[in-house]
């Protein structure tokens, strides 16, 4: 059994769980109800792959999840200026983010 994902945000964890179930990976969730009645808000929920052989597949599926919420800079296609991910248009030439 191998740990494939861990987060204190239960929404993200259940989202990850859905993705992995769609991939047909057998899962075990630890600490699923950990933060419900405890004073700590920092209990990490963990998703484990039951079969070690599913680990790479699981990581691969989750990389899509992680990349979609990344904060990477983007490069303007018009003037090649690097923009922070929070900008929707280029700060230099106002070209829209792609
Ligand atoms: Zn630009």
Image (spheres, rainbow, N blue to C red):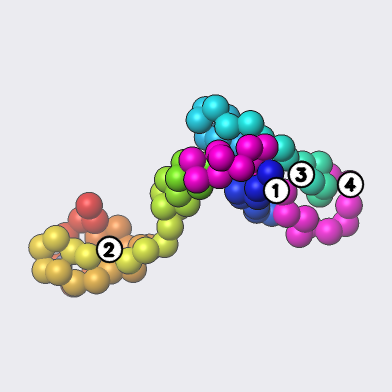
Is 51 contained in the magenta span?
Answer: yes
- Position above or below: 87 against 12: below
Determine the CA span between mark 4 and mark 2. 41 Å
Label 4, secondary structure: give it.
Answer: loop
Q: Nearer the viewer, mark 3 or mark 2?
A: 3
Residue located at (50% from left, 45% from top) = 56
Total marks placed: 4
Q: Nearer the viewer, residue 91 or 30?
A: 30
Q: Nearer the viewer, residue 18 or 82?
A: 18
Q: Are marks 4 and 3 in contact (CB under 8 Å)?
A: no
Q: Which residue is mark 4?
A: 37
Determine the CA span between mark 1 and mark 4. 17 Å
Q: Nearer the viewer, residue 32 or 76?
A: 32
Label 3 vs 2, first from the N-terminus: 3
Instruction: Please tell me the numbered disc located at residue 70.
Output: none
Residue located at (89% from left, 46% from top) = 37
Determine the CA span between mark 2 and mark 1. 31 Å
Label 1 vs 3, first from the N-terminus: 3
Label 2 vs 1, first from the N-terminus: 1
Q: Are marks 1 and 3 in contact (CB under 8 Å)?
A: yes
Q: Is residue 84 left or right of residue 40?
A: left
Q: Quadrant of residue 94?
A: bottom left
Q: Which residue is mark 2?
A: 74
User: Can you give x and y, in whole percent of width and height, for residue 1 in the image?
Assistant: 68, 44
Determine the CA span between mark 4 and mark 3. 15 Å
User: Can you give x and y, in whole percent of width and height, for residue 57 in the image?
Assistant: 49, 40
Q: Is residue 7 left or right of residue 81?
A: right
Q: Which residue is mark 3?
A: 30
Q: Are marks 2 and 1 in contact (CB under 8 Å)?
A: no
Q: Which residue is mark 1?
A: 46
């Amino acid at each position: 059994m191998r740990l494939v994902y861990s987060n204190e945000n239960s929404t993200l964890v259940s989202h990850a769980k859905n993705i992995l179930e769609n991939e047909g990976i057998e899962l075990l969730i630890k600490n699923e109800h950990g933060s419900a009645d405890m004073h700590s808000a920092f209990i990490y929920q963990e998703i484990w792959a039951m079969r070690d052989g599913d680990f790479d597949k699981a990581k691969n599926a989750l990389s899509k999840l992680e990349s979609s919420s990344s904060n990477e800079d983007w490069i303007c296609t018009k003037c090649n200026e690097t923009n922070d991910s929070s900008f929707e248009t280029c700060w230099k030439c106002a070209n829209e983010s792609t």
